[in-house]
Amino acid sequence: MNSPVNIFTDRRVIPPGGNIHWLVRPLLNPQLKYADPGKGKDPAGREVNKALAQYNRTAHTLFRLTDLEHCDVAMVPMDWTHIRGGQSWHATPDKETLRRVLQFARAAATANKPVVVFFCGERSHEPIALDDAFVFRCAVYRSSKTERDVSVPQVLLPDIQSEFKDRSYLPHAKAAQATIGFCGFVRPVTLTERLKTVVYKLYTRAILGFADVSQFKGLELRQKCINALQRSHRVKSNFILRTKSVYLTKDSNYKLRNRARGEFIDTLIGSDYQLCVRGSANYSHRLWETLCAGRIPIFLDTDCVLPFEEHVNWSDVLLNCDVRDLDRLPDVIADFHDSCSQEDFMSRQRRCREVWEKMATPCGIAVLIQERLREIAARA
């Protein structure tokens, strides 16, 4: 067994009430290894807490908290989203927290230690104020990726198979025609949103130095995919289309969300494939939910970098369609389905679940992060 990676971090960087990143939380609070994940009201939240509790018990075998002199890497103890001021594209950075983070990074640079930052969420493709940091991001554009960017999954998602134990997740046998599932928010982009996009691009060009991809791009692409699939006679559609988000609207309530989530799960496991298109950010939650359920993702590639490509042959797991081929999406799916043998079709579904266990659970991703941190330390 490899020895733990030595990590230096400093809780004084975190503002009062700030959230410590899940990876270093048990290092700063060893008592978490004995913590009960609790019952809670939300079944999905309970599953996330269970997975985190399992990681908390084993974190010390992967990572060890040390001083700056003896560390392998210096890790900022909170997600950069909190430093930039939240998820909004026009957020105001927390200047005091940013000052402390920059001071932390300067101390690491003086000691010749590499700085590591986690940046996940809607804005995680943005440049950060630490030019030499290694940044673990869940939204990465291949065309602008640097050697210091590491693509990672948005990891804190519940295990669907444990959350909904009463469903069957056995692999589907191959039918003559592919069934594509989707349950969620779909509607055309409005004129107001198109005008907001113009303002957004002008703002990001001024602030970031480039005109960023529209925050409504995912909504537009999702509608185009749905239209293309519904028009086709080569594939079957298993869709529940909502005109507003159940989770983001102010009038959402627990019962409504719980019913909608059950419908989502039924659509997911009742289909052979699941349509996975980016949202506001250049990644897809549905990709990981589909893998978790043991179904095959139809992934629309919008200049994406999939996580840990050196560990997973993604072409053996998902069906990738370049965004430039969106109009051909039904034919891409049907041609693949026709060429797939019964054995390959079922084994691919099993591989999907295996990839989720390896790459989307806190314990699984922590092992991969440990390996990457060793590489970063060796380069420093």
Image (spheres, rainbow, N blue to C red):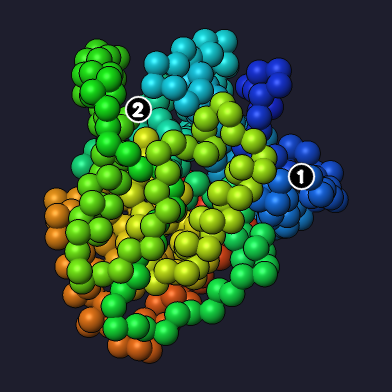
| Position in image of residue 295 (x %, y %) | 44, 69
Q: Residue at x 45, y 16 (%)?
A: 91
The residue mark sitting in front, 2 or 1, is 1
| Position in image of residue 6 (x %, y %) | 62, 46
The circle drawn on residue 41 is: 1
Q: Residue at x 27, y 27 (%)?
A: 190
When the figure is inspected, residue 165 is found, relative to residue 304, above or below; the finding is below
Mark 1 neighbour class, 10 Å CA radius: few under 14, some 14 to 19, many 20 or more: few
Between discs 2 and 1, the one toward the N terminus: 1
Q: Residue at x 71, y 46 (%)?
A: 42
Marks 2,1: beta carbons within 8 A? no
| Position in image of residue 66 (x %, y %) | 68, 40
When the figure is inspected, residue 64 is found, relative to residue 111, above or below; the finding is below
| Position in image of residue 198 (x %, y %) | 21, 19
When the figure is inspected, residue 64 is found, relative to residue 193, above or below; the finding is below
Residue corresponding to mark 2: 127
Q: Is residue 135 visible?
A: no
Q: Is disc 1 placed on a helix, strand or loop?
A: loop
Mark 2 neighbour class, 10 Å CA radius: few under 14, some 14 to 19, many 20 or more: few
242 or 160, nearer to the observer: 242
Amino acid type of the residue that numbered disc 2 sits on in the rendered structure: Pro
Q: Is residue 260 visible?
A: yes
Q: Is residue 340 left or right of residue 7?
A: left
Q: Is residue 367 left or right of residue 152?
A: right
Q: Is disc 2 placed on a helix, strand or loop?
A: loop
277 or 306, nearer to the observer: 277
Q: Is residue 277 left or right of residue 353?
A: left
**Quadrant into which the N terminus falls:** bottom right
Q: CA distance from mark 2 to mark 1?
A: 37 Å
Amino acid type of the residue that numbered disc 1 sits on in the rendered structure: Lys
Residue 279 placement: quadrant = top left
